[in-house]
Amino acid sequence: MTCLPTSTQKKLGLVIDLDTCVGCHGCVTACKGWNTQNYGAPLSDIDAYGADPSGTFLNRVFSYEVQPEEGAAQTVHFPKSCLHCEDAPCVTVCPTGASYKRAEDGIVLVDEDRCIGCGLCAWSCAYGARELDQDAGVMKKCTLCVDRIYNENLPEEDRVPACVRTCPSGARHFGDLGDPNSDVSKLVEERGGFDLMPDQGNKPVNKYLPPRLKDRLDTPAMTPVTEKEPKGFLGWLDKALERI
Amino acid sequence: MHPAPSVIIFTTLSGLGFGLLAFLGLGIPDVTGNTAFAFFALAYAMAAGGLLASTFHLGNKKNAIYAFSQWRTSWLSREGIAAVATLVIFGPVAIGRVFFDSDMALIGVIGSVFALLTVFTTSMIYAQLKTIPRWYQPIVPVMFLLHAIAGGALFAGASKLAGVLLLLLVGVMVWMWREGDRREADGADTMESATGLGAIGKVRMYESAHTARNYVMDEMIHRVGRKHAQKLRNIAILLIGALPAVMLLILPAGHFVSALAIILHLAGIAIGRWLFFAEARHVVGLYYGK
């Protein structure tokens, strides 16, 4: 079971636009809410109201400062969850067969009735996408909301992952990245979507869209006032004080 | 990586246990009766005790039986199977030597091969992880195997052989550390490749995704070990190999010398194995700027 499928009919995944993400953490909250009430063990919080709170999340948003060679630094908000890799090492290292990749749509899931909570899959993941729930003792990870996307009890517009449905800035897109004509594939093509840590060789399905080029100020950044040579009375005072 | 006591005890004890079994399978030392009982009891206690310790950190022990099912892809599963097979194979060998004064040479040799195979599978659990550049190198299995063989020789009372093997082990460990340092220093993965933002400029973490600690940080971002790494390496080298080897090779063989060498060796392994985990850097730390 932990053998990876040689190919999958679809490659369902997310495309995350680093240009439009505003870092509101709405996707984090929506994910925690949906996945606590649905598929598998709830995402627990430990010592939630105490001095040392911690909890399980399937999606987290980092913020980075990127400093170009010249000019002002840029802030980039960076949501990170399971990338549903084609060559997912978290699947093959699993001793119990709990970790598996579905042949029909490429989603990587954990069968909690087989998981022993050894944590080796989390060690093998370069992206920190798996967290061992400290209450249930089983490995938790993004399910791509497998219980939403095929759920005919939900209105059609809700049949996307909770993070995508909730994103207020339209920075998250869901679709079949194995189909070159899908909206998400075209978006990746148009915007130059990229893989995270390509050297790891995991072939992630999820793609990230780079921030667009920003406008640049023509005038140079302000020089600090103290570095200017003072003139007039201040100049005289400066020199006089230097001499003392 | 987080140096969990259960994993350190497991790799240390079971490695020594399987190492000793490998020698007993070859008839070294050639003992029967009560002496054989003592040797096999010690080997089984270390091998099985270590395996038992490894289950302490499992989050969900009740599913443990499934861990024997995925031998086709999982080194952890292969290890479980190899370990149980080794312990079973050595059953008749031990019973024969203890109660019937007989040597089942062929089964013993098969058992020895399985014992070393078990140690190899253990080592591959670590050496397969591309996410940890310090572990992802061929010398890691060599180190684990030499640890088991040298420790086994030490426990089996093959003093001179143990002395030579321990010196070899020290050499391998120094090599492993230096190569590990090199791999960590010029690793292909950087904050820029982790975030894919390198085309714009230099990346720095501005705000972490979470203010509290989490499982990923607890488990994979452990920095204390790196601070005193060089000192601990020197101590480990002295205790694991250099001092015991000198004692075993120069002093006349005897129980006292062997016991002292074993005590030093055990203390050294504990430090070395702690360091193996504590100083290893996982690439996920890049997302945290660490």
Image (spheres, coloured by chain):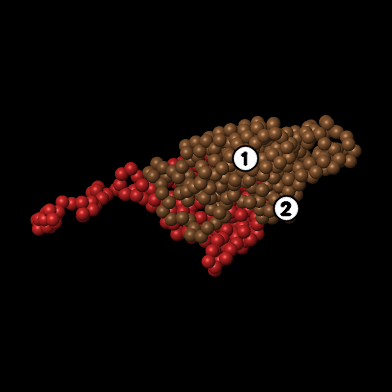
**Toward the viewer: A88 or B87?**
B87
Asked if A80 appears above or below B96 in the picture, the reply is below
| Label 2 CA crowd tier, 10 Å (few <14, some 14–19, many 20+) | some
Image location (x, y in percent) of residue A2: 67, 43
Residue at point 20%, 51% (across, down): A227
**Chain letter for the red part:** A
| Position of residue A127 in the picture relative to residue A138 (left or right) | left
Q: CA distance from mark 2 to mark 1?
A: 37 Å
Q: Mark 1 sits on what residue?
A: B240
In the image, is A161 to the left or to the right of A115?
A: left
- Give the letter of the chain under mark 1: B
Mark 2 or mark 1: name the one nearer the start of the chain.
Answer: 2
The residue tagged with tag 1: helix, strand or loop? helix
Q: Measured from the top left, where is residue B55 in percent x and y?
A: 70, 51
Question: For mark 1, does the 10 Å Cα neighbourhood hold few (<14), some (14 to 19), or many (20 or more) residues?
Answer: many
Q: Percent x, y for residue B138?
A: 60, 33
Chain holding disc 2: B
- Which residue is drawn at the image coordinates 46% and 51% (left, top)? A78
User: Relative to the observer, which residue lies in front, B182 or B191?
Assistant: B182
Q: Nearer the viewer, residue A131 or A105?
A: A131
Residue at the (52%, 58%) spot, across then down: B213
Q: Is residue A208 at least partly visible in the picture? A: no
In the image, taking residue B128 as reference, residue A184 lies left or right, namely left
Question: In the rendered structure, which amino acid carries the disc numbered 1?
Answer: Ile
Q: Colour of chain B?
A: brown
In the rendered image, which residue does mark 2 sit on? B63
Q: Residue at x 83, y 31 (%)?
A: B105
